[in-house]
Image (spheres, rainbow, N blue to C red):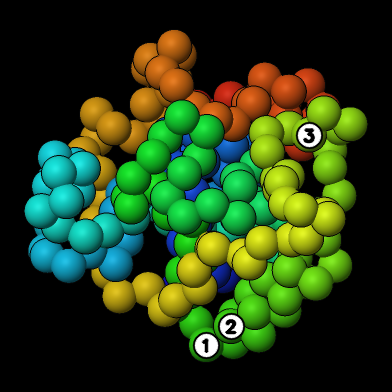
Amino acid sequence: MYINGAFMKELYLAGGPYYGLQEVFSRVKGVARVRAGFANCSSDSPSKEDIYSGKVEGRECIQVIYNPKKIDIVSLLSLFFTIINPYTDGIQGKAEGPQFRSGVYYTSPEDTMQISYYLTFLQNRGIHRRMTDDAVVFNAFEGEGGRRPPIRTEMKRLENFYEAPEEEQYFLRKHPGTYTPIHIDLLEELGTIGKVENERK
């Protein structure tokens, strides 16, 4: 894929409401485009109501188009796993439901090794380095004797992706009070993400 003459790659990330994920990744240097939508749906062109009611299976997800010369997939995964909880099945903060299950969906077979390696690292080496002592969001676990539960984030080939309606894109900018489990203000304060750049819409 080429945008303005530059080669781009794509990655699809799911983990709770897509509002927060879209806002975060749209402010990452090297990311050219982010669209909110639904991934691996069991029916064509589902509505949000279809997904939420369980009529259609699917995950709230974002499509991340990025320039691999400016940012690599590991850096994207590092940020992703810092701001979502990979140890739960369909629970991200107050958002609960199968549509909120975390997942990493790929379109290029060459990405599978790096994604698989990162998931193995996360499981075997522990929690990824926290950005602050209090952590930006979760990325913590509870268990007897400090035992780590299995990673619940799914890794699958992308079967389909349907963009959410335009009114759902960059929803947090239009409705700042909308709930998201991600501490976006802190990410901005720490310099992990940049300030809003409207041209990226």
Mark 2 is surrounded, within 10 Å at the Cα level, by few (under 14), some (14 to 19) or many (20 or more) other residues, namely some
Q: Nearer the viewer, mark 3 or mark 2?
A: 3
- 174 lies above or below 130: above
Q: Given the image, on which type of amino acid does mark 1 rest?
A: Pro
Residue 83: x percent and y percent?
65, 42
Q: Secondary structure at mark 2?
A: helix
Q: Secondary structure at mark 1?
A: helix
How far apart marks 3 and 2 lie (CA) works out to 28 Å
Q: Which residue is mark 1?
A: 109
Contact? badges 2 and 1 (CB < 8 Å)? yes
Contact? badges 1 and 3 (CB < 8 Å)? no
Residue 184 location, quadrant: top right
Q: Which of the two discs, 1 and 3, labels the residue nearer the N terminus?
A: 1
Residue 32: x percent and y percent?
54, 50
The reply to whether residue 164 is visible in this rendering is: yes
**Viewed as shown, does residue 125 lie left or right of 19?**
right
Q: Nearer the viewer, residue 89 or 84?
A: 89
Q: Which residue is mark 2?
A: 112
**Viewed as shown, does residue 119 lie left or right of 37?**
right
Q: Given the image, on which type of amino acid does mark 2 rest?
A: Thr
Q: Residue at x 47, y 55 (%)?
A: 89
Residue 63 location, quadrant: bottom left
Q: Nearer the viewer, residue 176 or 99?
A: 99
Q: Given the image, on which type of amino acid does mark 3 rest?
A: Ala
Q: Residue at x 67, y 33 (%)?
A: 137
How far apart marks 1 and 3 lie (CA) works out to 32 Å
Residue 25: x percent and y percent?
58, 43
Q: Nearer the viewer, mark 1 or mark 3?
A: 3
Q: Residue at x 42, y 79 (%)?
A: 157
Q: Which residue is mark 3?
A: 135
**Viewed as shown, does residue 74 lie left or right of 36?**
right
